[in-house]
Amino acid sequence: MSDSLHLSLVELPRQLGSTLTRELTWVVPEDCGTSSMRVEPGTELPIDVTLTSVDDGVLVQLSTDIELLGECVRCLDPVRREHAIDTAEVFFEPEAAARFAAEAGEDEEADDLLVIDRRNSIDIEPLLRDSIITLVDERPLCSEDCEGLCQDCGERWADLPEDHAHEVIDPRLAGLAALLDSGLLRDGDSSDQTEGEAR
Ligand SMILES: [Zn+2]
Ligand SMILES: [Zn+2]
């Protein structure tokens, strides 16, 4: 078990096509995901990694299964989504990265190249984190037809009876209702009718 995703490259032969396979268990830290969905911190994530020597660096293949947790944006119920991650990326040796950067000129893409030092280790955590973030649903729903919450009482519509409603009193009429209650308008022309409406 480990809280880092560094793999030593020393054991990976430079000969093209050489591979090195590792099974890691990563303890997921606090901030894995986004504010909408994340992997539960403390989860022990089994990760399969294969490193392959390629022309200009090392191909990293990574696979794992994750569960993303979030809240339904309409009713706030918990939402859980399972995903399989299967990703691959080439980490370049510094000389190759420099060559690409020179060829690309002003192109920004060259800045994004992942660079490694073959005498050292490789950190695959950014690769895994990026894969997780692309799976996040920024507006998770517990179900496609979630009706959300009643605006007035905050209960879930799914839990409320069909005829659920709140009596809405127009604030401009509230003063009138109070007058009617106090009986001050009782002698008015339309008192019977008005009183009937106001109960
Ligand atoms: Zn919902
Ligand atoms: Zn309500």
Image (tube, rainbow, N blue to C red):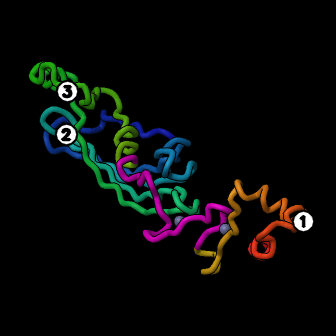
Instruction: Name the residue that disc number 3 marks.
Output: 110
Which marked residue is nearer to the observer: mark 2 or mark 3?
A: 3
* Residue at image location 52% in from the left, 62% down from the top: 79
Q: Picture coordinates of residue 135 (x, y %)?
A: 37, 53
Give the mark, 2 or 3, whose residue is nearer the N terminus. Answer: 2
Give the mark, 2 or 1, whose residue is nearer the N terminus. Answer: 2
* Residue at image location 24% in from the left, 42% down from the top: 89
The prevailing secondary structure element of the residues shown in magenta is loop
Amino acid on which the number 1 mark rests in the picture: Gly
Amino acid on which the number 3 mark rests in the picture: Ala
The reply, left or right, for residue 42 in relation to residue 15 is right
Quadrant in which residue 145 is drawn: bottom left
Amino acid on which the number 2 mark rests in the picture: Ser
The numbered disc on residue 137 is: none
Structural crowding at the residue carrying mark 2, measured as other residues with C-alpha within 10 Å and reported as few (<14), some (14–19) or many (≥20): many
59 to 66, vertically: above or below:
above
Kind of element beneath mark 1: loop
* Residue at image location 50% in from the left, 66% down from the top: 142
Quadrant in which residue 163 is drawn: bottom right
Structural crowding at the residue carrying mark 1, measured as other residues with C-alpha within 10 Å and reported as few (<14), some (14–19) or many (≥20): few
Give the CA separation, mark 1 to mark 3: 81 Å
Count all numbered tags in the image, as a single digit.
3
Give the mark, 1 or 3, whose residue is nearer the N terminus. Answer: 3
Q: Picture coordinates of residue 6 (x, y %)?
A: 40, 37
Instruction: Name the residue that disc number 1 marks.
Output: 183
The reply, left or right, for residue 123 in relation to residue 109 is right
Residue bounds of the magenta highlight: 133-157
Instruction: Name the residue that disc number 2 marks.
Output: 53
Which marked residue is nearer to the observer: mark 1 or mark 3?
A: 1
